[in-house]
Amino acid sequence: MLITFEGLDGCGKSTQLHRLADRLQRLGYRVTIVREPGTTPLSERLRHLLLEGPTDIVPLAELFLFNAARAQLVETVLRPTLEAGTIVLCDRFADSTTAYQGYGRGLPLELVLTCNRIAVGEIEPTLTFFLDVPVELAIQRHGIPDRMERAGPAFFERVRQGYWEIARREPQRVIPIDGTRSPDAIHAEIWEHVRPHLPLEQAL
Ligand code: ADP
Ligand code: TYD
């Protein structure tokens, strides 16, 4: 089972991902944590390029580079790990590309969705938590801005609205969560959504 965490930079994704991982592991589930872009050596190098590299990366190049990092992650980590029955928690996945390169940068959605589909193949998250926070709060929470984060508040407003569009289109998979509350309250809500999907036989 693949569970992904999405939202603006600083929305609290990583905090919630690790809390969920801890709880699942304490119950005896095998859990693997991955992040996008990154995790594999190639994907981490692409991450460095995308976040710390030249400022003049055009949107189309960005789309391909994020998906190149993703294709490597899917083939070498995600598919084999999921096939082994391990629960995978992913800090960002294809919805990030739809929200940031599609809605944020303004690339045609059909193009973005096609490119994402090529990179992910048949892999689909069972659940996606979209942690929603206002742009100002996200900016307050995150630290030194990287290349993406320097894009400015109007860009992040489009990304946030993009996530809401994705959530409206796929309400079965994408769960919007009010990310302005305490980490405990958010975790409790996430846990209620995850619990019914857990394979009972895997727990110790
Ligand atoms: P992301 O992975 O989305 O960038 P993080 O989980 O790293 O976000 O959180 C960004 C910052 O906000 C961290 O300093 C973290 O401790 C803090 N934070 C996370 N969740 C909350 C929350 N619910 N309320 C207040 N602060 C939070
Ligand atoms: P990340 O470390 O995940 O952000 P944070 O922890 O601050 O939320 O950084 C990834 C950055 O790359 C973030 O700004 C979102 C962006 N991104 C895209 O634009 N497209 C993508 O497909 C992905 C995976 C990330």
Image: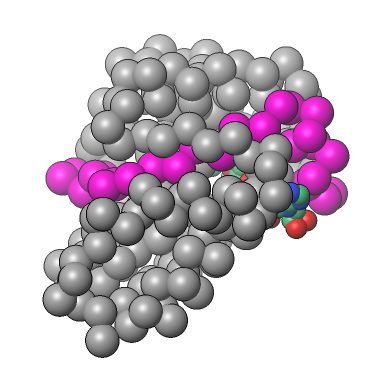
Tell which of 7 and 70 is nearer to you.
Answer: 7
The x and y percentages for residue 28 are: 33, 83
Whether 5 is drawn above or below 150: the answer is below
Residue in the image at 74% along x and 37% along y:
138
Q: Quadrant of residue 172?
A: top left
Q: Could you tell whether 187 is left or right of 156 in the image?
A: left
Q: Residue at x 59, y 24 (%)?
A: 160
- The answer to whether one can see residue 180 in this image is yes
Front residue of this view, candidates 136 and 78: 136
Kindly identify the residue that appears in the image at 63 percent across and 57 percent down. Answer: 184
What's drawn in magenta, residue-wise? 120-144
Question: Which sits in the foreground, 11 or 193?
Answer: 193
Asked if residue 54 is positioned above or below residue 107 in the image, the reply reads below
Residue 181's spot in the image, x, y percent? 69, 42
Which x, y percent locates residue 176?
A: 48, 32
Q: Which of the 4 image quadrants contains residue 31?
A: bottom left
Please indicate whether residue 157 sits to the left or right of residue 17 in the image.
right
